[in-house]
Image (spheres, grey):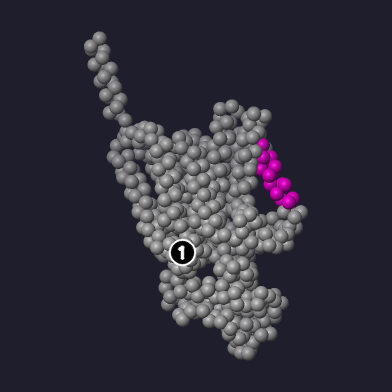
Amino acid sequence: MITMAKSINEKTKSIKKELTYYDKFENWAKKNDSKIFYTLIVACLFFSFISFNSRISEAHDDALYIEGGWRFVNEFPNYFYTQNAPLYPLFIAFLIKIIGFKLIIFKIFSVLFNLLGFILFYKALRGRIPAIVFIPVAVFYAINYLIIYFASMTFTEAFYFFLQSLFFFYAVKIIDVLNNDGLQIKNQIKLWLLFGLSMFLMSTAKSSAIVVIPAVILFFILEKNYKAILISLVAYLIFKLPYEILVKTIWSAQNQFSGQSKILLQKDPYNISEGNEDFIGFFQRFIDNCNLSFSKRFYQILGWRDETNTETFTIITLITVTLILIGFWKIIRNKNKEITFLSLFTAAQLTLSFIILQTRWDQPRITLVCMPIILILMFYAIYDFTIKPGIGQTIYIILLLLFVSSIFTDTFKKGFKNISIVQKNLKGDTYFGYTPDWQNFLKCSEWCADSLNKNSYVASRKAPMSFVYGKGKKFFPIYSVVKKDTSTNQSNPDSALAYFKKNNVTHVMLGSLRANPLDPSSGIINTVHNIFAPIAQKYPNKLRLVHTEGIIEEAYVYEILY
């Protein structure tokens, strides 16, 4: 008996010795799952608080959504948002109707959406992949500086992250049910409807998310579950068709894709005269966007490359994409259906974005919403290569510790710098934190609202931002040089005057907005100047200066005397 007891103890010790670092981490993660989950929620809220931005971004789009929401309410039913997907402006319109125009409240909702998105993401995927892969990605989602930045802005990212995570949550549940019980429509109808609703909401919040439909079809084709394809489409159309009917009936509007398709087909979104892209052009656009995303933006988001560095490196793109594809192959080979499904959707979303978006619109937001699944695939590739005990596991864990610490450090540094800015903003200094060029431009917009006649219509290079700081005053947008003379690349003065007169424009605002926000000597965004300089040269008496804002990097308001 003593001999048997010793033998059992020796076997037990042997088993304990055979536990790898990955096994130990998995056991630790299972025991502390709730603590990890709630710690990340607290961290997300903490960083959202110290990084809170009560201002409007210089990137313009967030102001565009707010203006769209305001116009939904105040121009109903004569206005429908068609610049891109309309769901978020519709949500802003709902808030404006209920509580009025309160920018801070809009931003608080973004914080809540971001937090809910993280919660749903965590609940959807924990236990679906090894903890050594999942926990670092969850940390990234909870505290990455750029995600936290968008959490207090009125861009669509926080809203979309929530809806994307909602889709992930129900997609995983659908796969679970099909694996365990098979397809039983009567017992599963509520779940299928929620799955369809999540697809509808996501694709109405971001146009590129329409690829969710082909992604769902492809996945169920691979699963040879053709009935699931039909039910998924029906569940989606149950919400999509009534929505389209309402849009046609109430607003007599086109769908969200009609308003964008013409611009997306153009070689230059701001110059229709250059014509549309051909097949080679779209292919080159895809390659260029891949480079921008995977050799620049991806590593800037991680905090490993300087945000001002514009260089791209094909070799880095190839290495990154190769690692992602290896992870995807490993996921398929190990029959992880949930991550396979979400990877197909993410790949489709990136592919469509890279094809349809012009490279001059290069922004981290395109890559950001796909980062969680991209990181899962990359980490899974490394995990699978190092699954056997050895130095590989040690190296991988060290890399993950560096990854997590760099994310924490980057977010903390940027959040700490922001504290003094947000304090002054919340105390009433709404312009603190902007560079002088933007302060003058936005103060000029406010002056227009306060001092000009209510019937005045002011042309502005950043009309939605002027709208927000002009307390809801509508401005005429200028995004490119109108009535361009190809010999000078400036406007034809007579044609431009006729154009503005036709649109009832009474004034124009000329800002000194920096071409490079970090360098005041880099020149200015001169679109408006290229329109009005020829007018001033040919008809000097037709532009009368009525206001100047600032001493350096001034902004001017001119009355147009037709």
Q: Residue at x 54, y 37 (%)?
A: 172
Q: How many marks?
A: 1
Q: Quadrant of the N terminus?
A: top left
Left or right of 25 in this view: 240: right
Q: Residue furthest front?
A: 427
Of residue 457 and residue 13, the one placed in the foreground of this image is: 457
Residue 361 percent location from the top left of the image? 53, 63
Can residue 86 be spotted in the picture?
no
Residue 438 percent location from the top left of the image? 49, 72
Q: Secondary structure at mark 1?
A: loop
Left or right of 304 in this view: 525: right
Q: Residue furthest top?
A: 1
Magenta highlight on residue 384: no
Q: Residue at x 44, y 65 (%)?
A: 424
Label the magenta part by its dominant secondary structure: helix
Q: Quadrant of the C terminus?
A: bottom right
Q: Residue at x 66, y 37 (%)?
A: 231
Left or right of 164 in this view: 45: left
For badge 1, the amino acid type reads: Lys
Q: Which residue is mark 1?
A: 427
Residue 47 percent location from the top left of the image? 42, 52
Magenta highlight on residue 233: yes
Of residue 523 and residue 162, the one placed in the foreground of this image is: 162
Q: Which residues are magenta?
A: 231-246
Q: Is residue 448 above or below residue 19?
A: below
Can residue 203 be spotted in the picture?
yes
Of residue 410 and residue 535, the one placed in the foreground of this image is: 410
Of residue 436 and residue 128, the one placed in the foreground of this image is: 436
Q: Residue at x 54, y 56 (%)?
A: 105
Residue 332 percent location from the top left of the image? 49, 38
